[in-house]
Amino acid sequence: MIKQLLTSVVWNVDYLIIDTPPGTSDEHISVMENIRQAPVLGAVLVTTPQMVAVDDVTRELTFCRRTGINILGIIENMSGFVCPTCSECSNILASGGGEQLAEKAKVTFLGRIPIDPTLSRCTEEGLNYIDKFANSPICQIYHSIITKLTRQTDEEMEVEK
């Protein structure tokens, strides 16, 4: 099914996001085997700040390196909780695991994305969070991550020419 999805669809996109479970399962191997036909600039790894998640992503990072996939960066998801009343962000889980992994692995740390109930609500209601809350701190984080990735991928595409 993964092979059919990756090879039978004309994606015609600049970025294809493939969300996989943590670790190095059969899904990862299948994606790697079938995506090699496309010009892949790299992978963005996403972790939550807890050590058990960071350990899973460390294995994924090793897997990517062994299979020749460049790591574009690491994002720490669920890094804090945005209060729906006052918009203050509090660390309810551990913090900094993604950034520590990026430093250790010598890859770009792209940013921390906190849990925001407003984002969840927009998703449930089919609303575009970025359009609706363009000036929110989360949108600023998204834009920062996108800017870093775009700059990095543009530079890598120039090197390949």
Image (tube, rainbow, N blue to C red):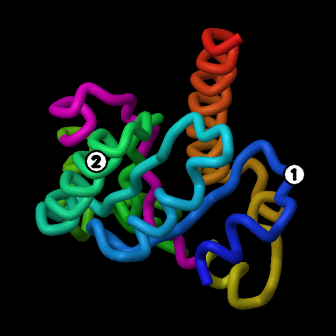
Q: Residue 67: within the magenta? A: no
- Amino acid on which disc 2 is placed: Leu
In this image, 9 relative to 106: left or right? right
Magenta span covers which residues?
101-117
Q: Quadrant of the C terminus?
A: top right
Q: Which mark is residue 160?
A: none
Which of the 4 quarters of the picture holds residue 73? top left
In this image, 43 relative to 21: left or right? right
Above-or-below relation of 15 to 105: below
Question: Secondary structure under badge 2?
Answer: helix
Which of the 4 quarters of the picture holds residue 4? bottom right
Residue 33 in percent (x, y) is at 49, 59
Q: Nearer the viewer, residue 81 or 59?
A: 59
In this image, 83 relative to 156: left or right? left
Q: Quadrant of the N terminus?
A: bottom right
Say whether disc 1 or disc 2 marks the residue closer to the N-terminus: 1
Residue at figure coordinates x 21%, y 64% from the top left: 56
Going by the picture, which residue comes out furthest to the bottom? 124
Residue 132 in percent (x, y) is at 82, 64
**Residue for badge 1:** 12
Residue 146 in percent (x, y) is at 64, 39
**Residue for badge 2:** 61
Query: How would you rate the neighbour count of disc 1 (Cα within 10 Å): few for under 14, some for 14-19, many for 20 or more?
Result: few
Residue at figure coordinates x 82%, y 78% from the top left: 127
Question: Secondary structure under badge 1?
Answer: loop
